[in-house]
Amino acid sequence: MATTIKMPQLGESVTEGTIERWLVKEGDTVEQYDPLFEVVTDKVNAEVPAEVAGTISKILVPDGETVAVGTPVAEIDGDGAGAGTADDAPAAEAPAAEEPAQAEPAEAEATPQAETPADAGEAAAEQQEAAPAEPATPAPQSPAAEPSAPDDEAAGANGDGATGTARMTPAVRRLVREHGIDVAQLRGSGAGGRVTRDDVLAFIEKGPSAPAQEAPKPAETAAAAPAEAPAAPSTDAPAHAAQAPAATPAPASVPSPAGGDVEVPLSQMRKGIAKKMTQVKQTVPHAYTVIEVDMTNVVRWREANNAAFKAREGASLSYVAVVVKAVTETLRKHPTINSQFADDKIILKQAMNIGIAVAVDNGLIVPVIANADQLSISGVNGRIRDISTRANAGKLRLDELTGGTFTVNNTGWFGSVTSMPIVNAPEVAILSMEAIVKRPVVIEVEGADVIAIRHMMNMACSFDHRVLDGAQVGFFLADVRKALEEWDPGTPIG
């Protein structure tokens, strides 16, 4: 009996993934949990294991193809019969032929989610890159062109475009309509000539399409319509008025490379980061608070314990582990900070799953330390070291990328003293710890003000203003600061 392998969901806000490469081929025999293929998303590169043992009877999606979560990508024959028999061929081909129609409901549901905060990036990124092709440009599309949209949709549903070869999902068809693209100009790179989202974006990046350049002509036709049909102004005018506010300016054209310029294609991860960071900034009203923390007691405690800890564990004590410990102890007093936004409600999370922003070669990901409040400082330190190492090696497990309730970002390691991180939605707050620097500070000693050299650190908190206000975040940060500034020299490492 054949088992269908589907594209897994590699994160709470992930709706699609790209098969980087297959690690097996049709006819290969695999054991349960053997890696089948490498998948790339905006969050991580991961190997997807076999759900059952058997023979790879069919690979449905080739290398480099991006598909929605839940899309069948392969079949494993648990009886070991393999592929290529005459009886199996019709059964395997029938679902593939119906795939566009079956994918429509899933695509239709996934598209609105991509516009909500719950689907907005997850990364606590310091860099904010907006994909130039993302903004929709309905303005050039005049009412005269609107009746063609149902025809395009019907053609796409049948697997035929204007040329009889354009196949695309509903989400891609909508993108085509938004940009007023003639489907006859598109060339699909997907399986069976299917037009993918990347094909459309690549077409847009090359420059204005012919329909976009001819947009004034339909407008002139619409303007001339009242002269031929006097009744038109009374019916068309409200439609124009209703559409006017929705119009958005077309994205600025990007000049072609010149001289020694070098074009570097965006990786799948960077494309995802650009898209999701843009979405979260557009949908989550950000507010920011920065406080100053005297870390002198923490620094002295670390200096007193680091040598022995390193000899025992083979690694140094991290300030991030200390801050995470202080944060988890404080979150219990401020449950709204440890929550998620869900459209018409706020979900107060019982677990304290702390996301740690990790910079990797091709982007930024946020693996999660589950139940961080139940770990000792040594335990948190070990988990941070472990997930950071495996994140850079692309060896994170899928469950380590989901379920975060609050994120800690260490921008101080490269010298930053102030930053404004982007909220890792659907979480409602993210904390950045900046560089610890020695500088003169006025402190009170025995009732007198004196100038002393202290180890100072800024902490910046970005938060979702739909859920949190400045006072709530201020009280939370004040308690975190108090925990760090009054750090007990005898605090056990664990």
Image: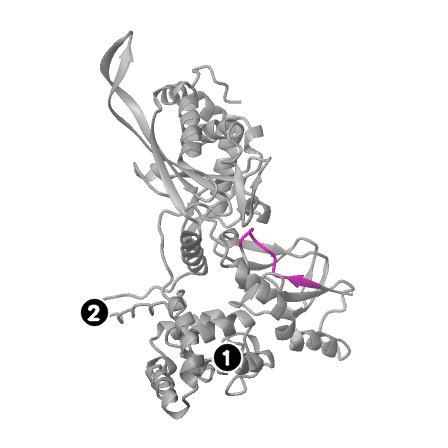
As displayed, is residue 264 above or below residue 140?
Answer: above
**Which quadrant of the figure has residue 191?**
bottom right
Query: Which label's residue is closer to the chain start, 1 or 2?
Result: 1
5 in magenta: yes
The spot of residue 493 in percent (x, y) is 50, 22
As displayed, is residue 181 above or below residue 383?
Answer: below
Q: How is the image coloured?
A: one colour
Range covered by the magenta-colored residues: 4-13
The quarter of the rendered structure image containing the N terminus is: bottom right
In front of the other: 267 or 213: 213
Please name the predominant secondary structure of the magenta segment in the image.
loop
**Which quadrant of the figure has residue 80?**
bottom right
- Using the rendered image of the protein, determine whether residue 316 is visible from the camera's viewpoint: no
How far, Cα to Cα, is label 1 from label 2?
42 Å
The residue under the point 36% across, 67% down is 248
Identify residue for label 1: 149
Instruction: Name the side, left or right, on which 22 lies relative to 485.
Output: right
Instruction: Look at the numbered discs 1 and 2 and tell me whether their residues touch, using CB distance below 8 Å.
Output: no
Numbered disc total: 2
Which numbered tag is attached to residue 334? none
Identify residue for label 2: 259
User: Looking at the image, is mark 1 or mark 2 nearer the viewer?
Assistant: 1
Instruction: Name the side, left or right, on which 178 lies relative to 435.
Output: right
The spot of residue 457 in percent (x, y) is 33, 29
Crowding around mark 2 (Cα neighbors within 10 Å: few <14, some 14 to 19, many 20+) is few
The residue under the point 35% across, 24% down is 295
As displayed, is residue 220 above or below residue 268?
Answer: below
Residue kind at label 2, given as amino acid type:
Gly
Provide the secondary structure element on which disc 2 rests.
loop
Residue kind at label 1, given as amino acid type:
Ala
Crowding around mark 1 (Cα neighbors within 10 Å: few <14, some 14 to 19, many 20+) is some
